[in-house]
């Protein structure tokens, strides 16, 4: 018997489980020997990376022998201009997931509390466990956030509140007045992270909180965003936070010097400037959402209205079984029992033919 290193690992590690990602296409191909797999499991952009990003990457491959620009000067300039913020307000991460971790590393420890909603992003409870902070989960209301419940949960030990807007995996969202009114009641020393991984998808006519405007108004707000979703760079890992410069300065103290690699920086700069691609992908998403919602309704399934690039629906059964049956048809969706939703499945919005393949498979396995 070799030595059990878990016995000497930091105490909180024993209660952790590795994050469960969407099943990779290649894995299912190996298992089933199927040629055509449709993966609608990880809220990836079905349009693939833009041609401009591809070109920029090719043009910079020769730079790879050098370390990246650790300060990511050019990328921060592009972001600062686009978002009308100061470059000193930006913290870059290896995906916004890393930025969320940096916030935890800086502000959470076993003496503190962190608040998030039931059925929200699993990274929040995972991080709380890892850092030994008390995780306070506030029950959801109609699958969305109960902001009054969150306010009532604040104590003198609360350091951070996580608000995903829209929320993953439910797709629910918060309006501007609602979030503003909430922030007015949060004590100034409690950080509120508005996780806006899907913000670019939301049409102008939807009442949706403008996180950057709220950040200008409230110094305790940190807005986090991702280039993995609408900008289609999930594989390269780029995300960022917008906060006061003072908070950004704290986050940057624990950030690894080269956390965003050279190609990721190059790709992010090109992607942020490719408005044509952005508009195309937003349209594909909007049309795909209608297609999925219509199809689900026709098959008699209820879904939760979503502003993300995914739709979550009630399978009215143990979703794990339905998930397996869909896998056997070559369709990968996302079981969300780790989010406390064992009856639901989350399906990412794909290209028209992918959405159709999912709906067809769903029809067959539930016939
Ligand atoms: C996808 C997602 C993220 C993480 O995105 P990355 O930038 O790829 O790390 C963060 N928050 C929410 C709510 C998400 O759904």
Image (cartoon, rainbow, N blue to C red):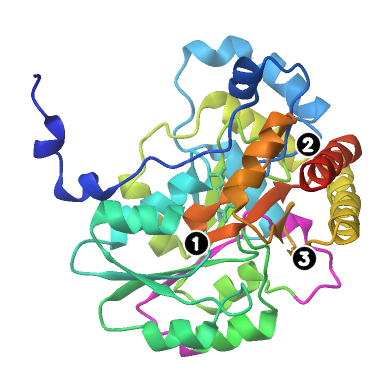
Number of residues whose C-alpha sits closer than 10 Å to that of mark 3, classed few (under 14), some (14–19) or many (20 or more): some
Q: Quadrant of residue 204?
A: bottom right
Query: Rounded to the nearest whole Å, what is the CA distance between mark 1 and mark 3?
Result: 18 Å
The answer to whether mark 1 and mark 3 are in CB contact below 8 A is no
53 left or right, relative to 238: right
Q: Earlier in the sequence, mark 1 or mark 3?
A: 3
Magenta run includes residue 154: no
Q: Residue at x 64, y 43 (%)?
A: 323
Name the residue that disc number 3 marks.
302
Instruction: State which region is magenta.
Output: 185-207
Residue 171 picture location, percent across and down: 68, 62
Location of residue 284 by image quarter: top right
The residue that appears at 73% across and 37% down in the rendered structure is 271
The answer to which of 253 and 154 lies nearer the viewer is 154
- Please name whichever residue, 19 or 224, is drawn nearer the observer in this view of the structure: 19
Determine the secondary structure under disc 3: strand
Which residue has dot 1 on it? 340
Towards the viewer: 339 or 220: 339
Specify whether residue 187 is painted magenta.
yes
Q: Rounded to the nearest whole Å, what is the CA distance between mark 3 and mark 2?
A: 24 Å
User: Is residue 20 positioned above or below 129 on the image?
Assistant: above
Residue highlighted by disc 2:
46
Q: Is residue 326 left or right of residue 217?
A: right
Specify whether residue 95 is in view. yes
Q: Is residue 275 left or right of residue 331?
A: right
- Looking at the rendered structure, the secondary structure element under dot 1 is loop
Say which of marks 3 and 2 sits in front: 3
Q: Is residue 224 above or below residue 279?
A: below
């Amino acid at each position: 018997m070799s030595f059990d290193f878990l016995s000497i690992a930091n105490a909180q590690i024993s209660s952790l489980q590795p994050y469960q990602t969407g099943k990779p296409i290649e894995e299912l191909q190996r298992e089933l020997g199927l040629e055509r797999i449709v993966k609608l499991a990880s809220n990836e952009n079905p349009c693939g990376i833009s041609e401009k990003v591809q070109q920029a990457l090719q043009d910079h491959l020769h730079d790879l022998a050098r370390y990246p620009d650790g300060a990511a000067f050019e990328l921060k300039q592009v972001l600062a201009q686009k978002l009308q913020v100061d470059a000193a307000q930006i913290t870059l991460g290896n995906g916004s997931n890393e930025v969320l971790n940096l916030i935890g590393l800086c502000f959470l420890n076993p003496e503190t509390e962190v608040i998030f909603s039931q059925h929200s992003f699993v990274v929040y409870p995972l991080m709380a466990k890892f850092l030994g902070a008390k995780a306070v989960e506030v029950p959801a209301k109609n699958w969305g956030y109960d902001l009054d419940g969150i306010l009532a949960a604040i104590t003198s030990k609360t350091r951070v509140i996580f608000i995903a807007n829209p929320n993953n995996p439910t797709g629910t969202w918060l309006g501007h007045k609602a979030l503003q009114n909430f922030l007015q009641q949060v004590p100034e020393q409690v950080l509120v992270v508005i996780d806006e991984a899907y913000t670019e998808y939301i049409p102008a006519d939807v009442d949706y909180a403008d996180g950057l405007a709220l950040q200008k108004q409230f110094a305790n707000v940190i807005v986090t965003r991702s280039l993995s979703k609408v900008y289609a760079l999930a594989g390269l890992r780029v995300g960022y936070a917008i906060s006061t410069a003072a908070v950004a300065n704290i986050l940057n103290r624990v950030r690894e010097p080269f956390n965003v690699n050279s190609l990721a920086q190059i790709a992010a700069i090109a992607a942020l400037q490719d408005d044509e691609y952005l508009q195309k992908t937003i349209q594909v998403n909007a049309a795909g959402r209608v297609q999925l919602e219509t199809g689900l309704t026709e098959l008699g399934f209820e879904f939760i209205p979503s502003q993300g690039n995914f739709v979550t629906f009630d399978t009215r059964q143990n979703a794990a079984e339905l998930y397996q049956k869909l896998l056997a048809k070559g369709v990968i969706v996302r079981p969300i029992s780790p989010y406390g939703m064992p009856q639901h499945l989350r399906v990412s919005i794909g290209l028209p033919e992918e959405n159709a393949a999912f709906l067809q498979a769903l029809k067959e396995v539930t016939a």
